[in-house]
Every structure is written in structure tokens, then in C-alpha cells.
Amino acid sequence: FGFRDEEVEIPKPTNVFRVICMGGSTTEEGPIEQKTYPNYLEKMLMERVKEFSKIEVINAGIPGITINKLWFRIPDLLLMQPDLIIFCEGANDITHIFLPYWIKQLDGYKKWLLNSVLARDLFPLFFLPSDKQIRTDLQNDVLPYVDKIINYLKNKNIPLIIMSVPIPDYNAMTWQEKSYFQYVTRKWWGGRSLNFHMYTYILNIYNQLLREKTQDKGIFYVPLYEKFMNESPLQFNDLCHLKLKGIQKKAEIVSSYVAEKIQQIQSENK
């Protein structure tokens, strides 16, 4: 199937519960296949849930993918006959689509001030649109694809879990930590105009919208963003990618929620 994991047996063997983790590089990441969050999650679920001879967790992460493209890949995922799908994405939409778009739309004195390194570093949020505009753009251009994924899987009777996108807590960082994350944001994520604080601010709004969407649609929600606010920024390599210790922590957080969802599914099927 072209994903970073073991071969997937089709048709699915009897008494196997198959979970698919869909997302971008934050799902795919890990130094080797056995040290990704889906692989750690598989081992943890096998210890937590005893009703099945095997629980398979498939890493279907695709680096750089945006939510509209994930929507197009849903039929590929269903060919693997999943019993549950876990969705987590949003970083690529913010960094590759929205932030460059909003920066390009600047005019007048804001466009002129953007040339000032001092202004960009001291007042990065000044260059963002209003909260209302951010919410409107996300609701109009991202959330409809989340809706499509939710409705399509519901029609196919495939349970879905949606996770918020984690990030280190900007307000709890030291000056040195903020400087490091700002450096890697500029170097790896979009050049001199983008700022780490911009990303954290927008991601907070996006995660709020995602949480509201799950509540409105009755979708099982994993507060990964909220949980990682209590973790050290040193769990992260950059604005979204985790070091190995962070990947393990992510799997630990997710495993309890997924185990609860699996037991809920089992209870409903009896």
C-alpha cells in the first residue's frame, strides 16, 4: 500500500482488530519503523485490550500531506479493512497554505514593516489577520474536508478518532527555547517571514475548532494538544515533530483513549 509499515494482509485475518493512523509526517516519523507512534501504540494496545488475538496499528502517515489530500486517500485506507481510523493533521495546512497566504495578503504599512527583523521578532502576531478572519478561513477551507472525512467514514460504518495537534507550550518556554524554535521555524518551515509564535497562535485556534467539530459531530476526541502543554518543549525537534522520547509519550497518551474506544466499539457490537 506504499505506507511506512509492515505488509498488510488482505483479507484481514479473523480476530484481528485493525487500526489505521492517518496524518502527515508527525504520524510517519520515527528513526526506524519499529519506533514510530503507531508501532508503540500497537504494543501498548496489545497489553491493554485482551479481546483479540492481535491488534494491528498501521502507520499511514504521508509527509507533507494536507487535509484535503488526506480526504482523497480515504478509499486507499478502506482497502486495508480497518476497524478504526485515527486522524491527526493540521500543521501542514497552517505552515504551507495559510501562513504564506496571509503574509502575501499584507498591504500598506504592515507590508512595509514586515521587512524589519526587529518588528517581526518583537510583534509577530501583528502580521496575522484578526481572530475572526483566521477562524473564518479555517472553517471555510479546512474544516469542510474534516466534515467530508467524518461523513464518509460514518456512511461506511468505520469508527473515527480525531486528535488535536500537539505543540510545546510557548508561554512556558525559556528565552533560549523560544529562540531555538524560532530558528528552526525559519530554517525548515518557510523563511524569514514566518514566526514560531504565529504558528502556535493559529494552531490554538485550529485545535479549538477541531474540538468543537468533534463535539458537534459526536466524534471521539483525543486532547493531544492539551496533554503536551504539560510536557517539556525538549520533547520536540521543531514546531510539530517529536524526538523519540516524545513519540513514546504520544503513544502512551493515545493508548488509553484508543483502548477506551475499542472497548466502546466492542460493547456496541454485542
Image (tube, rainbow, N blue to C red):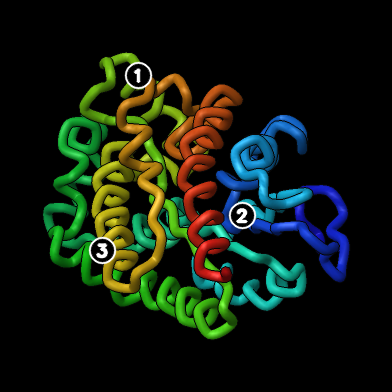
Q: Type of residue at label 1?
A: Glu
Q: Type of residue at label 2?
A: Cys
Residue at x 28% of width, y 21% of height: 173
The residue pinned by badge 2 equals 21
Can the viewer see residue 51? yes
**Secondary structure category for the residue under label 1:** helix
**Secondary structure category for the residue under label 3:** helix
72 vs 169, left or right, is: right
Rendered image quadrant of residue 1 = bottom right
In-front residue for pair 102/213: 213
- Name the residue at the front extreme: 270
Q: CA distance from mark 3 to mark 1?
A: 31 Å
In-front residue for pair 185/132: 132
The residue pinned by badge 1 equals 177
Q: CA distance from mark 1 to mark 2?
A: 30 Å
Q: Which mark is residue 205?
A: none
Could you tell which of marks 1 and 2 lies nearer the N-terminus? 2
The residue pinned by badge 3 equals 212
